Image (spheres, rainbow, N blue to C red):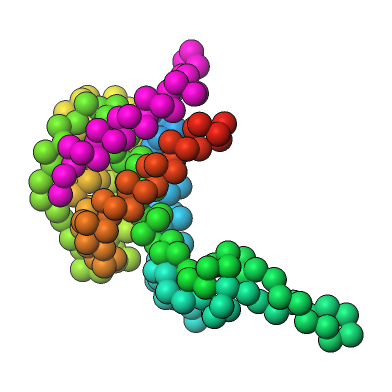
C-alpha cells in the first residue's frame, strides 16, 4: 500500500480545488469535509445494500452484465410500437459499473483530504476488523463521529490524530471485507482523482 502516493495525489487535487473554490472568511472547511465523509459513507452503505432488511435485493452493486443485456432497453410506445433506447443503468455499455468500489474511493478522497488538514504522517499501519460488514460500517461511522467531536469540542491535536487513525484503520479493513484488493482501490482512486481534476477544469 503506497499511502504516501495517494496523499500526494490528494494534496494536488485539494490545491486545485482551493484554487477554483478559495476558502471564504470564517469558513470551516474541515467541518464540511467531515460531513462530506459521512455522506459518502452513507452512499457506500447504500451500494452495499446488506442492511436493507425490507428488500429482497441485498446484493452489493459490484458491476457485471446489465439486465438489459446489450446496452438497450425496449420502450413501449402507443399501439404496441417498440423503440430501442439506451439503458440508463449501463448507459449503453451493457456492463454495470462497480459503484460499490466507486463510492469506497469517493469516501477515501475525503479521508485523505482530512488527513492533509491534520498534517498526518502517511505511515499508518494496522487495521481493526469487526465480525461482519454491517458492524464494520457502523464502527467506521462511530469513529468519524468521535473524530468530529474531537474537532468540534477541541479535545486537542493528539486526540484528533488518534481518532483519525482509527477511521483509517477501520476503513482499510472495510475495503478488504467488501472484497477489494489494495491494487483495485488504488487504481479506482487514481481514475476518480483524474475525473475530479477534470471537473474542476470544467467549472463543476
Asked if residue 150 shows in the view, the reply is no
Residue stretch rendered in magenta on the structure? 1-28
- The chief SS type of the magenta part is helix
Horizontal relation, residue 65 to residue 127: left or right:
right
Q: Would residue 16 be counted in the magenta stretch?
A: yes
Identity of the residue drawn at 55% across and 34% down: 202
At 62% from the left edge and 66% from the top edge, which residue is drawn?
A: 88
Q: Does 37 appear above or below 72? A: above
Where residue 99 appears, as percent x and y from the top left, is 43, 61
Rendered view: 152 above or below 173: above
* In-front residue for pair 132/118: 118
Residue at the (39%, 47%) spot, across then down? 192
Residue positioned most to the top: 25
Give the camera-side residue of 122 and 202: 202
Asked if residue 171 lies in the magenta stretch, the reply is no
Image quadrant containing the C terminus: top right
Residue closer to the observer: 24 or 77: 77
Amino acid at each position: 500500500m503506497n499511502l504516501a502516493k495517494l496523499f500526494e495525489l490528494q494534496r494536488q487535487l485539494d490545491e486545485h480545488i482551493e484554487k477554483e473554490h478559495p476558502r471564504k472568511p470564517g469558513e470551516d472547511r474541515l467541518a464540511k469535509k467531515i460531513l462530506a465523509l459521512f455522506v459518502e459513507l452513507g452512499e457506500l452503505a447504500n451500494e452495499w445494500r446488506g442492511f436493507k432488511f425490507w428488500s429482497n435485493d441485498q446484493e452489493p452493486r459490484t458491476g457485471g452484465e446489465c439486465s438489459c443485456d446489450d446496452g438497450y432497453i425496449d420502450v413501449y410506445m402507443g399501439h404496441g410500437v417498440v423503440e430501442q433506447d439506451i439503458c440508463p443503468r449501463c448507459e449503453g455499455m451493457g456492463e454495470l459499473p462497480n459503484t460499490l468500489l466507486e463510492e469506497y474511493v469517493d469516501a477515501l478522497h475525503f479521508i485523505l483530504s482530512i488527513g492533509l488538514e491534520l498534517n498526518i504522517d502517511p505511515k499508518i499501519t494496522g487495521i481493526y476488523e469487526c465480525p461482519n460488514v454491517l458492524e464494520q460500517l457502523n464502527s467506521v461511522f462511530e469513529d468519524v463521529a468521535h473524530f468530529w467531536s474531537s474537532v468540534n469540542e477541541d479535545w486537542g491535536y493528539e486526540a484528533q490524530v488518534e481518532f483519525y487513525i482509527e477511521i483509517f484503520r477501520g476503513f482499510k479493513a472495510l475495503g478488504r471485507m467488501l472484497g477489494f484488493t489494495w491494487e483495485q482501490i488504488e487504481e479506482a482512486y487514481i481514475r476518480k482523482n483524474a475525473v475530479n481534476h477534470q471537473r474542476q477544469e470544467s467549472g463543476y
